[in-house]
Image: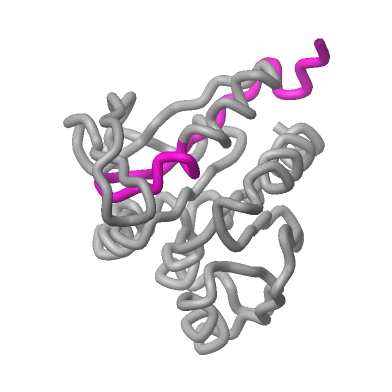
Amino acid sequence: MPQPLRGRKIAILATDGVEQVELEEPRSAVTEAGGEAVLVSLSDEPIQAMNADVNKADTFAVDLTVESASAEDYDALILPGGTTNPDRLRQDTQAVSFVMDFFQSGKPIAAICHGPWLLVEADVVRGRTLTSYPSVRTDIRNAGGTVVDKEVVIDGGLITSRNPDDLPAFCEALVREFAAAQS
């Protein structure tokens, strides 16, 4: 089985309220492609995932706090959704700085559903074309981004998708784009 992400280290930034499937499926795609997925969060306590935003799902152990993490140590970043997850993250200056550092270093970022809220907060969508969950689209436009309604949008190392139904295409695109990016 090909492992296009062998030797690549991918950060997944998430906290309580993350949509479980949007955490699990991209993480599985990374590990199945030979990469190392590292769960970065606001604290070292396990995070509570949700199903459909309102039903408690599993908890996930955190590998590293955002305070201890550096974009230099990773090849790419994944921002899963869930309404509460990115809303909490965008209120944390270290989480926002972590995202900004990936953009400034030219490393790819994949965001799904409400995940682009964190991109808006980091002020990195201006002049970019992306997609998201419908309720986030006005925020993207107000931040200078162009929104399209497509399963996956790739714009200069930024991979975005709308919702959990897009996960197969999102995971395929992020593995392909992360593998193609320079380490």
* Quadrant that contains the C terminus: top right
Q: Could you tell me which residue is drawn at 65 percent across and 52 percent down? A: 166
| Magenta stretch encompasses residue 25 | no
Residue 151 position, x and y percent, is 72, 60
| Magenta stretch encompasses residue 20 | yes
Quadrant of the rendered structure where residue 59 is? top left
Residue 140 position, x and y percent, is 53, 79
Q: Could you tell me which residue is drawn at 40 percent across and 70 percent down? A: 121
* 23 lies left or right of 125: left
State whether residue 120 is above or below residue 80.
below
Between 17 and 122, the one lying in front of the other is: 17
Q: Could you tell me which residue is drawn at 73 percent across and 67 percent down? A: 150
* 87 lies left or right of 135: left
Between 110 and 29, the one lying in front of the other is: 29
Colouring used for the render: one colour
Number of numbered discs visible in the structure rendering: 0
* 50 lies left or right of 12: left
Quadrant of the rendered structure where residue 148 is? bottom right
* Quadrant that contains the N terminus: top right
Residue 50 position, x and y percent, is 31, 46
* 89 lies left or right of 164: left
Over which residues does the magenta segment extend? 1-23
Q: Could you tell me which residue is drawn at 51 percent across and 86 percent down? A: 138
Q: What secondary structure do most residues of the magenta stretch adopt?
A: loop
Quadrant of the rendered structure where residue 15 is? top left
Spot the residue most to the bottom: 142
State whether residue 51 is above or below residue 158.
above
State whether residue 51 is above or below residue 75.
below
Residue 115 position, x and y percent, is 47, 59
